[in-house]
Amino acid sequence: MPSDTLNKNALLQADSLSFSYGIEPVLKNIRLQMRSGEMIGIIGPNGAGKTTLIKLLAGILPAQKGAVYANGKQISEIKRKEIARLIAYVPQTVDLQFDFAVEEIIGMGRYPFLQGMALLDDGGRPAVEQALRTMDLQPMRRRSFLSLSGGEKQRTIIASALAQQTEIMLLDEPTSSLDLKHQQQIYRILRRLTREENKLVVLITHDINLSAQFCDRMVLLHNGAVIADGRPDEVLKFNLIQQVYGVKVYIDVNPLTDTLYILPYDTENDATDD
C-alpha cells in the first residue's frame, strides 16, 4: 500500500527507505521527493551510501524497508522493461565480456523498445545518431569499445543512456574518468535535458564545485542518512562540510558563474628546518 506521505507530484520518491548489507545499516530512513525538471547532485564521503541509494532508486536493489515510487507506482511492482522505459541508469563502471562497436553499445540503450529479434526499433537510429553527436563520438562510432580510453568508454555509456530517452536519468559519478572539457560538457548536457526536455537527472558526484555550478539541488549523505537537502547555497555550509568530510574549507562565490566554490585547505605547517 502507498504511504500516506507519498507525494503525487514527485516523479521519483524514496519513502522511509532503509537498507543494509549485513548487521550495520547502509541507509537509514531516507526520504526524498524528486520532480521533473530537477538536476540533483548526491554528495557525501566514501561509504556514505550514495551508490546503494541510486541502485535502490533504479530498482536494481530491492528495498528492505520503505519503498521507492516512480510515477506514483511502487518500483518493486513494475516490470523490468517498463522501468527501463522510465529510468536510465549509468553505473560507475561497466565490465563488458564481449566486444562491440561504439554505435552498437549506444544502440543497446534502445532495448526497452525492441520487439522480437529486431536490433533497433523505429526510433532507434535517430536516437543513436543524436547520442553520437551529443557526446562527440561520431569519429569513433565503429571503434571497438574495448579499445577506448576510460573517458571514451564513460562517454559511450552515457550516450547509451541518452539514446534510451527516459524521463529519469540516474548516474553514478558520470564524470570521474573525464577531462575538464568533457566534465563540463556532460554537466551542461544534463542540465539542458532538465531545462528543455523536463527530465529528472540525479547524479552521484565527488565534484562539489561542478555540482554547485550546475545542479538545482544537492543532497548531502553522511553515515547513511540525509543531513542536508536543498539549493547548493543551503547545503554547502562551512560547519556541515567540515563535519562530514573532516577537512577545513574555504567557501566563496565564483564571480564568473555566481555560484559557490569550495576549496579545502590545510593549516598545518609541514615544512622542516634546514
Image (cartoon, rainbow, N blue to C red):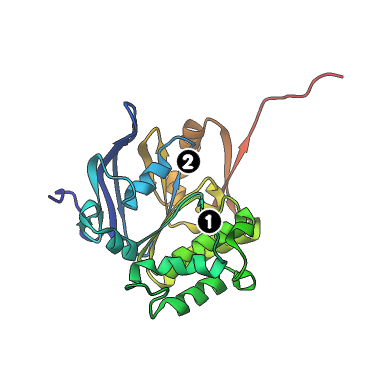
Amino acid type, label 1: Gln
Q: Quadrant of the C terminus?
A: top right
Residue 190, placed above or below residue 132? above
Q: Between residues 189 and 82, which one lies in front from this camera angle?
A: 82
Name the residue carrying label 2: 237
- Residue depicted at 43% across the width and 36% down the height: 48
Dot in front, 2 or 1: 1
Q: Is residue 93 left or right of residue 123?
A: right
Q: Name the quadrant containing residue 250.
A: top right
Dot 1, crowdedness within 10 Å: few (<14), some or many (≥20)? some
Q: Percent x, y for residue 12?
A: 29, 56
Q: Mark on residue 107?
A: none
Residue at the top extreme of this rendering: 273
Image location (x, y in percent) of residue 162: 46, 67
**How many badges with numbers are in the image?**
2
Of the numbered discs 2 and 1, the one sitting upstream in the chain is: 1
The answer to which quarter of the image holds residue 133 is bottom right
Q: Which mark is residue 213?
A: 1
Q: Are marks 2 and 1 in contact (CB under 8 Å)?
A: no
Could you tell me how far apart the alpha carbons at marks 2 and 1 are, in whole angstroms?
Answer: 15 Å
Position of residue 178 measured from the top left corner of the image (x, y, whole percent): 61, 55
Residue 164 visible in the current orientation: no
Between 9 and 123, the one lying in front of the other is 123
Residue 262 visible? The answer is yes
In this view, which residue lies farthest toward the left? Answer: 1
Q: Amino acid at mark 2?
A: Lys
Local SS, label 2: loop
73 to the left or right of 145: left
Q: Point out residue 184 in the picture as x, y percentages from the top left corner.
A: 59, 60
Report helix, strand or loop for mark 1. Answer: helix
